[in-house]
Image (tube, grey):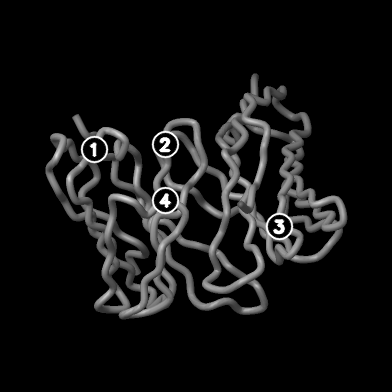
Amino acid sequence: QKEVEQNSGPLSVPEGAIASLNCTYSDRGSQSFFWYRQYSGKSPELIMSIYSNGDKEDGRFTAQLNKASQYVSLLIRDSQPSDSATYLCAVKGSGTASKLTFGTGTRLQVTL
Amino acid sequence: NAGVTQTPKFRILKIGQSMTLQCTQDMNHNYMYWYRQDPGMGLKLIYYSVGAGITDKGEVPNGYNVSRSTTEDFPLRLELAAPSQTSVYFCASNPPDTRGVNEQFFGPGTRLTVL
């Protein structure tokens, strides 16, 4: 059973702080890693993807991947109240059909 | 482009009834997926399709059926609805992998309650 694990939270950070969200996965053959943001009652939307070890930055978001440790994280700098949402980690394992395995998500609350 | 559309948005079923959740995408994507999301949980893959005429089971297929007669449409059929099928159902699609790139585009979801 391929698993993706996240702390369900809630993770509470003050406005302007850095939010750090973490994800571990079990399938060593996993190739691609994604972070989706999901607002309450809405569908998931992709905010970051990462394929190689190291960091990938996009605006206030940085994704970090360590395949040896089977660990991927998302940092959100200068957190805003609009960042309050559930963040889903998704992993594309070895194999075909682009199937993703999702974690249960971490709920982030950015407080004023 | 409308992207991925789903109908209905909400539905209440009685135990034992059946229904079809509709999903259509206008992006000419080969790959399509059906997920369910229970409260406070992640997405569980029900069925997926890599092209017209080809479907396969995901993680939680029991109680569901799918068909894929065209590239655009991927309906999900519930037979003999049970309370355990109360959930939010999302349809998603993406084009074939390009160097591992795999952004799945999601529809708005169907909220189903079985009483």
The residue furthest top is A112
- Disc 1 and disc 3 on one polypeptide chain: no
Q: Nearer the viewer, residue B88 or A25?
A: A25
Which of the two labelled residues, at mark 1 and mark 4, occupies the earlier sequence position?
A: 4
Marks 4 and 2: same chain?
A: yes
Q: CA distance from mark 3 to mark 4?
A: 19 Å
Quadrant assignment, res A76: top right
Q: Mark 2 near mark 1, Cβ–Cβ under 8 Å?
A: no
Q: Chain of mark 1?
A: B
Q: Which of the marked residues, 2 or 1, is nearer the chain's N terminus? A: 2
At 40% across and 71% down in the image, what residue appears?
Answer: B49
Q: Is residue A15 above or below residue A39?
A: above
Distance CA(mark 2)–CA(mark 1): 14 Å
Q: Tell me the SS state at disc 1.
A: loop
Which element type, helix, strand or loop, lies under badge 4? loop
Question: Mark 2 highlights which residue?
Answer: B38
Q: Quadrant of residue A73?
A: top right
Q: Which mark is residue A27?
A: 3
Give the distance between the C-alpha atoms of the residues marked 3 and 2, in whole angstroms.
Answer: 24 Å
Query: Which residue is drawn at the image coordinates 32% and 64% (left, top)?
Result: B2
Q: Amino acid at mark 4?
A: Val
Instruction: Say which chain tag 4 marks.
Output: B
As drawn, is A68 to the left or to the right of B3?
right
Given residues B56 and A44, the one toward you in this image is B56
| Numbered tag placed on residue B82 in the rendering | 1
Marks 1 and 4 close (CB-CB < 8 Å): no
Residue situated in front as seen by the camera: A14 or B6 = B6
CA neighbours of label 2 inside 10 A, class few (<14), some (14 to 19), many (20+): some
Foreground: disc 3 or disc 2: 3
Residue placed under numbered mark 4 in the picture: B60
The residue at the point 76 percent across, 52 percent down is A63
Establish whether labels 3 and 4 are both on one chain: no
